[in-house]
Structure formats: structure tokens, C-alpha cells
Amino acid sequence: MLTSQRRLGAGAVRGEGSRGKYHELAELEGEPHVIRRDLVDSENRSPIEPKRAIAVIAHLTDLHVTDVQSPARFEFVNRDWEDPRFQNLLTMQRPQEALNMHAIDAMVQTLNGIDALELVAVTGDTIDNVQRNELDNVLALLNGGVVHPDSGEPGYEGVQLVDWPDDIFWKPDGPQDGDVFRRDLGFPAAPGLLDRAMQVFEATGLSKPWLGCHGNHEEVCQGMGIVTPALAKAMVGTRKPMDLPLGLDRDKAVETFIERPEFFLTGETMDVTPDRKRRPISRAEFIEAAHMPGPYYVHDTPEIRFITLDTVCAAGDALGSIDAPQLHWLERRLEEVHSSFRSRDGSTVRTRHQDRLVVMLSHHGLDTLSNPRADQLSDALLKLLLRFQNVVLWLNGHIHANRITPRLDPKGGHGFWEVTTSSLVDWPCQARLVELFDAGAGLLEIRCTMVDHRGTDLAALHRELAANVPFNGIDSWREGAPEDRNAILLLPSPF
């Protein structure tokens, strides 16, 4: 479960194609924690001896609960993966995606086995395509309830069918030479898998409270395109696109998808079963369903204030943004948990407020708050956070990879740690355990440990398939370096 005890990696070759090999997963030795002192005095080499636990939380992000049969998914774009003009629209389809809800349920059960866990931070993109049936399923997975992976009429009706007229998708019921994944990459046959994956099942649900967060896939089509009236109608309709539309200007493919995604529905299509439950959701509907007080909000515990931001740009595109009103709101919320802070002119302001540690939550991290359709205020956000010394940690996702970044204060203040966790839908299909300790000697310790789920059967196959996806699996950048995974992050105690 904890990768400090054992981790997963490439095992024996299970299949071989003309261009690659398919590996089973094997248990490897555990990965020790890397001690990172980027934010402490280089001369401070005090031994790390956690004296008091402050909080134990889990970080889940980018679950991507997906209606894999939706007419408003554009899987055929994967065919152009080598064209750089389409890179920002990828990935539209994954071999493992029909099994994703089973992997999420397995991770929930695994987190429930951590007795000390107090809270789960879920930082956005819980769903894939801004649809109500996806939202219903993620709520069942996180809260407990009945999960309905299928949509339309009973039985799988999508691009992984044997008779779907395209060979770029893994077809588990198909012949060895029937698709690129089986023919070229050695992916296995799995007869009946899709029918099993579509079966209704009862989800366990988290045993501890969770904090929701708005992501771009909860706002726009496949995380990119504005939900226009024409697209909303197509979502619940009967025509599923199979190819790029005639007349598409490839140089403007991304811009067209963002502003007029319905244009991608005008190429060759297939008849599918309609489903009213596929209707698009609004931001307000998501906020209400996730029991969030608002698009951005605070959650207080005796020692920590969690501040959740909304970094999604309603104008489309996957990149994030933050506006001036939200920055103003954030400044007031930070003041409320500081006995003193640095003002904009550099002077010290003292208050009557009691100190609390601050943990920030958002979908996008600092480096992806660069949406060209919105104001560029990421620098203002960083300057604001660095003025408040009780900010110690920022948890986010979006990039589907593990990354830990120290945010140093150029003016000599404490700085904070930005921790980005990989997605559950893509390799390495993990969550992150985050523990805060008083480490003594004037130090605060943030201990990060990656968590593998204990799932078997469909959940285990989901992870194995993800590990073998070219450029996104075991051989990719998504795991991060050792210092981005299991790490002990030190910083001066702010108070």
C-alpha cells in the first residue's frame, strides 16, 4: 500500500508486438523518503524527530470518472497524436478507461485502511466530460452508493468494440492483428472484459470527510471546449463522431475545439443510443452536489485552515486562471489566521487573530495558471502567498504527474511547498499520503508518501494497462523523480 514499503514496476514480458512489449507489474523494493531542505537554513542539520502529529490527510486528484460511450467524446483525435497541432487536445481515449471506476473504488478502500487518516483532499477533474451521469458516479464512489458505469442501452457501445471501424483503440475481444495495441504493442486479449466493466456495482465510499475542488473537466467538454447549446444537445443525442470534420483548419484545431466543439461532430458519425443522463452540468450544480460552500471556500480544523481555490477558466482551454476578486477574498481569509503578516509595502502588520497553519488546495498549480483567455495573475498570487508565513503547503494536480516544488521567498521569508500529485486514471495510478509533524528544533515536517491501491481483478488490470501505454506509462515522466514522490519536506515553523 505505502510505496515506502514496496512499489510497483515493470515485471515479466506478457506480450510482444512489432513495436513494443507489454509488461506485467511486479513488486519492487520500497522507496525511502528523500529529505528536502530547500526551504531551511543550509546550516540547520538537526536530526528529524517528529514530536507531534498535526494532521494526516490523503491527496486524490484527477479521477476522471468517464462515460466511455458518450457521443460528445472525440476519441478519434488520438489518431493525430504525432501532429503537434493536436497535442493540447490529447489524450482523448485510454485503453484502461472503461475500468477506471473500479480502480477508484479500490483506492477508496485502500485509503479507508489508513487508521490515522483525518481528511481527503480531492483537487478536481473528478469527472471527465462535464456530464451529470459522470457526476452521479463520482459521488457514489466517494460517498458510497451504486455505481452505473454503463450508459445508453445495456452493454458497451463505444470505440473498443470489435466491429468499431477504427484500429487505433485497444479491443480486448478482437483478434491479435485487429488493432494497434494488440498488433504493435503486445496488449493482451480479454474476452468479455467490456461487458464486465459495464456492470452495476456497490461502491464502498470514503470513511473520512473529503473536500471537493473545481477542475477544468467539470467545466468544459473533455477539459477544453465550451459547452455550447449545440454541444449540449449532442451530448444526449444519437450521433457519435468517428473522424475529423471536413474543412477543419489543422492550424486552428485547438482554438476551434475550444470555441466551437460542436464542429467536431460534423464528420462521419455512428448511431448510438441516446441518454438524457448525459446532460451537461453547470458550475453551480457541481458545487452543490460536492457540498462545497462555494466555488472557493475555507475549511477549518483546530490547527489548520484549508483554503480551496477555483482556478478554472470558464472561457475554455485546459489551463487555469485566477481573477482579482478571488485574490482579494484570499487575502482576507489569510489575514484571519495570522497574528502577524507582511503588508504589501513590506511592513509587519499585527492582528488579534490566532495563528493557524494554512494548506492551499486547487486543481491547477502555479505553473499552469497561464490561460491565455484570462488575466495573467499567477505572479500576484505567489507574491500574496509569500506575504503570509503560515502558508506551508499547496496541494494540486492537473498535470497527471508527481512534482514537488519549493516556493522560496526572495525577500527572505519562510516560503512554502507546492506538492502536485499524479492522476488516478494514468500511470502510476496513485494517491499521496501527506502528514504534518512538529519536528522539533523549530522545524515543521511535511512527510509525503505515495500510495498504491490494493485492487485486484478489474482495478489491477486498469493499472497494468496504464503502465503499458506508450509515452504515458512506466517509461514516461509521470512518476516524477524520487524527490517528487516519497519526500520529507522541511521548513521553519511559522509560529
Image (spheres, rainbow, N blue to C red):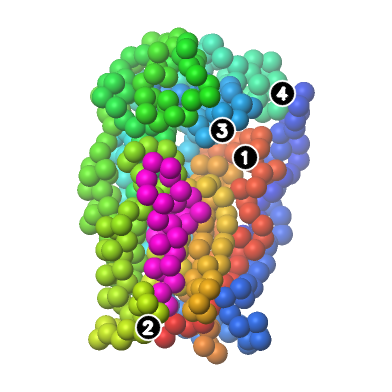
**Residue 272's disc number:** none
The first of marks 1 and 3 along the sequence is: 3
- Mark 3 closeness class: few <14, some 14–19, many ≥20 residues within 10 Å: some
| Residue range corresponding to the magenta coloring | 361-390
Q: Whole-Å distance between the Cαs marked 1 and 2?
A: 48 Å
Mark 1, mark 3: which one is toward the viewer? Answer: 3
Quarter of the image holding residue 219? top left
Amino acid type assigned to the residue bearing label 3 in the image: Gln
Q: Whole-Å distance between the Cαs marked 2 and 3?
A: 46 Å
Mark 2, mark 3: which one is toward the viewer? Answer: 2
Residue placed furthest toward the front = 345
Disc 1 target residue? 472
What is the x, y in percent for residue 414? 49, 78
Relative to 165, say whether 130 is above or below. Answer: below
The image shows a total of numbered marks equal to: 4
Mark 2, mark 4: which one is toward the viewer? Answer: 2
Quarter of the image holding residue 343? bottom left
Amino acid type assigned to the residue bearing label 1 in the image: Asn
Task: Please indicate whether residue 285 sits to the left or right of residue 202 in the image.
Answer: left
What is the x, y in percent for residue 153? 34, 19
Disc 4 target residue? 184
The first of marks 4 and 3 along the sequence is: 3
The first of marks 2 and 3 along the sequence is: 3
Disc 3 target residue? 87
**Judging from the image, what secondary structure is the residue with disc 3 in?**
helix
Can residue 47 be seen here? The reply is no
**Residue 347's disc number:** 2
- Mark 1 closeness class: few <14, some 14–19, many ≥20 residues within 10 Å: some
**Judging from the image, what secondary structure is the residue with disc 1 in?**
loop
> Which residue is drawn at the image coordinates 69% and 15% (left, top)?
177
Amino acid type assigned to the residue bearing label 2 in the image: Ser
Q: Whole-Å distance between the Cαs marked 2 and 4?
A: 64 Å
